Image (cartoon, rainbow, N blue to C red):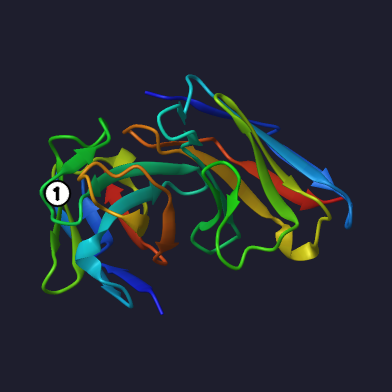
C-alpha cells in the first residue's frame, strides 16, 4: 500500500498570509506514460463532507478559488493557499489514486493565528 | 445539480449487518465509478471500496474485504454497501462519492468530485 504522510499535522497562519501543506507518498504516484501525478487534495470543514480542491497534483477543480494551488511530482507534493481567508479554516487531506487501496494522508488542520 | 444522498446507517450490535444506500441524481450514473469512504469519529478519511460504472469491477480495502460488498443498480442510479460481520472498528460516518472522470477501463484511477453528507454507522460491542 502507498502510505501518504502530511506535514505539519496542524498549522496556524495569519489572515492574508501564505499557508503551505506538504504531502509525501511512500512510492511514486507519477505515471510516465501520460505524464500525470495521481494525487488529489481535499478540504473538509467541520460537519461537512470533503470537497475536492486539486487533482492531477496541480489542476484546480471547478469553482475553486485561484488562491489554492498544488505542486510537486513523484513523491513530494505541496498545497499552497496564497492569501489565507477566514473561510479556509479546515482540515486538508492529500490522496493518491495511483493504485488501490486509495490512501489519504492523516490530515492537516489549518487555523487562523 | 449532482446530488448524493446516503441512508441506511444506524446502531447495530457487533456481528450484525447493515445495508447502506446512496441515491444519486444530476449525472449519468452508469458512466461513473462510485466509491465508499468512511471516517471514524474525530479521525481521518479511509477509502472502503470502489465499483466501476458497469458494476463489473470492484475493489476493497483489506479491512473490509470478505465482509463488505459494494454493488449498484444503474436503473435506479443507486449505490449500495452491504456490511456483514460488523465490528466496533467499523463505527464511522460513511460517505458515498462519485468518480470524477468517465469510467472507461473498469479500474478507476481518479479523484472523487462529489460527496454525500454521510450516514453514521455505530457498532456496539
Q: Quadrant of the N terminus of chain B?
A: bottom left
Q: Identify the residue at image location x=34%, y=47%.
A: B91
B20 relative to A15 in the view: left or right: left
* Mark 1 neighbour class, 10 Å CA radius: few under 14, some 14 to 19, many 20 or more: some
Residue B95 in view of the camera = no
In this rendered view, identify the residue nearer to me: B106 or A113: B106
A40 relative to A86 in the view: left or right: left
Q: Chain of mark 1?
A: B
Q: Quadrant of the C terminus of chain B?
A: top left
Name, please, the residue furthest toward the top: A27
Image location (x, y in percent) of residue A82: 81, 51
Image location (x, y in percent) of residue B92: 37, 50
User: Residue at label 1?
Assistant: B16
Image location (x, y in percent) of residue A27: 47, 19
- Image vertical order of residue B87 relative to residue B33, above or below: above
B43 relative to A69 in the view: left or right: left
Q: Quadrant of residue A43?
A: bottom right
Amino acid at each position: 500500500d502507498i502510505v501518504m504522510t502530511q506535514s505539519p499535522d496542524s498549522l496556524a497562519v495569519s489572515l492574508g498570509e501564505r499557508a503551505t501543506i506538504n504531502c509525501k507518498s511512500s512510492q511514486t504516484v507519477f505515471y510516465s506514460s501520460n505524464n500525470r501525478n495521481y494525487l488529489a487534495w481535499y478540504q473538509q470543514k467541520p460537519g461537512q463532507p470533503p470537497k475536492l480542491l486539486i487533482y492531477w497534483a496541480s489542476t484546480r477543480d471547478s469553482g475553486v478559488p485561484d488562491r489554492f494551488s498544488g505542486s510537486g511530482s513523484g513523491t513530494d507534493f505541496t498545497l499552497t493557499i496564497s492569501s489565507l481567508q477566514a473561510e479556509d479554516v479546515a482540515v486538508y487531506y492529500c490522496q493518491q489514486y495511483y493504485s488501490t487501496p486509495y490512501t489519504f494522508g492523516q490530515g492537516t488542520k489549518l487555523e487562523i493565528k | 445539480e449532482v446530488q448524493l444522498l446516503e441512508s441506511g446507517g444506524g446502531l447495530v450490535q457487533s456481528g450484525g449487518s447493515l445495508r447502506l444506500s446512496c441515491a444519486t441524481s444530476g449525472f449519468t450514473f452508469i458512466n461513473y465509478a462510485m466509491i465508499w469512504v468512511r471516517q471514524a469519529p474525530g479521525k481521518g478519511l479511509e477509502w472502503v471500496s470502489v465499483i466501476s460504472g458497469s458494476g463489473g469491477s470492484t475493489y476493497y480495502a483489506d479491512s473490509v474485504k470478505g465482509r463488505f460488498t459494494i454493488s449498484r443498480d444503474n436503473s435506479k442510479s443507486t449505490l449500495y454497501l452491504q456490511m456483514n460481520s460488523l465490528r466496533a472498528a467499523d463505527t464511522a460516518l460513511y460517505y458515498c462519492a462519485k468518480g470524477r472522470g468517465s469510467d472507461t477501463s473498469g479500474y478507476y484511477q481518479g479523484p472523487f468530485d462529489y460527496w454525500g453528507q454521510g450516514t453514521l454507522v455505530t457498532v456496539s460491542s
